[in-house]
Image (tube, grey):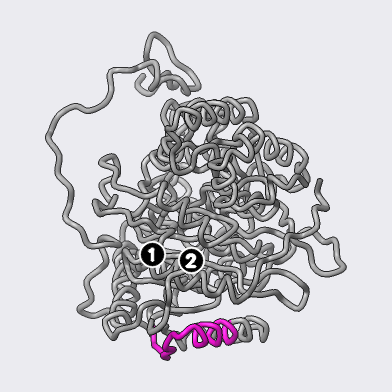
Amino acid sequence: MSSLTSLTLKAALDGLAAKSFSSEELTQAHVEAVAAAKPLNAFILETPEKALDMARAADARRAKGEAGPLEGAPLGIKDLFCTEGVRSTACSNILGNFVPTYESTVTSQLWRDGAVMLGKLNMDEFAMGSSNETSAFGPVVNPWRRNGGNAQLTPGGSSGGSASSVAADLCLGATATDTGGSIRQPAAFTGTVGIKPTYGRCSRWGVVAFASSLDQAGPIAKTVEDAAILLKSMSGHDPKDSTSLDIEVPDFASFVGKSVKGLRIGIPKEYRVDNMPVEIEKLWEQGIAWLKEAGCEIVEVSLPHTKYALPAYYIVAPAEASSNLARYDGVRYGLRVPGKDIVDLYEKTRAQGFGKEVRRRIMIGTYVLSAGYYDAYYVRAQKIRTLIKKDFEDVYAAGVDAILTPATPSAAFGIGEKGGADPVEMYLNDVFTVTVNMAGLPGIAVPAGFSSEGLPLGLQLIGRAFDEETLFSVAEVIEQAAGRVDLPQAWWA
Amino acid sequence: MAIDAATVRKVARLARIAQPEEKLEPLAKELSGILAWIEQLNEVDTDGVQPMTSAVHMPIPMRDDVVTDGGDPAKVLANAPKTVGGFFVVPKVVE
């Protein structure tokens, strides 16, 4: 592995600024790393020529003294983001060879700030999954393996390609999205940092829609500081998304390294779920101890509706998905399967184009929204969402600054190991993360230790709405205390 | 609530997803399993609770009622499976 690919984003930007190397050199090193990492299946489309063109343009801008905040930094882009002139499929067969004629707002801001695109990253189909196994392009492989084993593990999902490529040093950072945990769970499974910002922080325009009231974009990065740098570029008001927040974007990176002395950290007792593995419990205790040492005040808090978040999510998310995915009709773009009439065309196209999990969720969503069931399911779930949000508001009103929880109920599991017989088994992966989406709050996953089998484990911090700054400060304390996560041996290259 | 094959057939039709007859029964079982897990929500007292309508409270943004985009049919049609003379083509809908 070239030393240029092992740099953090921050170190690479510093090196570019100091003219220690050019973006072309940095990008070339990453292009080669991507090309050599086929066994991970993290990239589903490589754009090396575009990357090198963008890198040369970045070098030219820097030479003229016009360098942007991400000038010359090669990144990976989750395939949920529409990229102009570059195939974007949400890893679904139904989008076929869709080539957008427009650029998503989030990615356009990254290019505005000088970033370089290495290609498109694998993910669960339409971001529906927790293991990257529902992708039409096949599963992503986690660069981490169990001690002494060579079983292929999942990197989690849905942003599995983003997490795997960042962990394996294929890119300096990646875009991702999170509807129920899709940034934080894969980050935890791969020893990377992932933040889902407050709902509305990042524009959803040009991001393929799954569940519009829950979807948020965010970065997966090597360090807390890198995540802060990327989030600043990705955030900001966009008139094209009516739920985009018209508020100032802070310089998130300036909060990394800030003292956390005196902050009150809540520990929600409801997150001590039944059958929680001992090592997750210990990790959580360790995190509490680190924050105490750093001068935080630890307080037990109660979020009484926690256990209802996941079942309520499995009403809200499929309902919104069934509505959003109605647009895939075989007429305007993507796959078309001929039929004897228009309805037959729709039904055949959608049966063939959508994978099993997506069809399942559309069916649930259609059912819960159908006549006679709407109040019993959807309205009830939205009421429970109000209660979940109120739980958090009460805790924050009592003076708590952030909440510390485990990020996932286990370390990374094997490909094919979960959800085969019972889909709910897979859904339970999001038990600690989904409450945050339901309440629209920011949440960050940060590496904090290892399982007995040598796999990375993460802790989650949940913040007040619009207060990502505190999360960056506290997450960095955990990152520093836990020590740098050593890269897995590059068995794939 | 357990759902049966007839309900699955109806929902599949509403969702415009072709489901072969032999898949209806297994699918009914699978969806019933998920719905049974969701049933635990009935334990929660939601009397007098307002359903959430937006994740973050903010005023609804307003803008001038003017055309801000469009006028590029080639872009709109660029990814269509079948077009003729600037139109999307579908099977005959009206006899």
Density class for disc 2 (Cα within 10 Å; few <14, some 14-19, many ≥20) is many
Is A378 placed left or right of A448 in the picture? Answer: left
Does A401 appear above or below A129?
A: below
Is A180 placed left or right of A240 in the picture? Answer: right
User: Does A292 appear in magenta?
Assistant: yes
Q: Position of residue A155 (x, y in %)?
A: 66, 58
Does A106 appear above or below A261?
A: above
Subunit that carries the residue with mark 1 = A
Find numbered disc 2 in the image and state the secondary structure of the residue it sits on: strand
State the CA–CA distance, disc 1 to disc 2.
9 Å
The C terminus of chain A lies in quadrant: top right
Decide which of B3, A131 is in the foreground and name it.
Answer: A131
Q: Which residues are magenta?
A: A284-303
Most distant residue in the bottom direction: A300
Q: Position of residue A444 (x, y in %)?
A: 48, 66
Label 1 sits on residue: A468
Q: Position of residue A346 (x, y in %)?
A: 47, 34
Does A374 appear above or below A232?
A: below
Label 2 sits on residue: A444
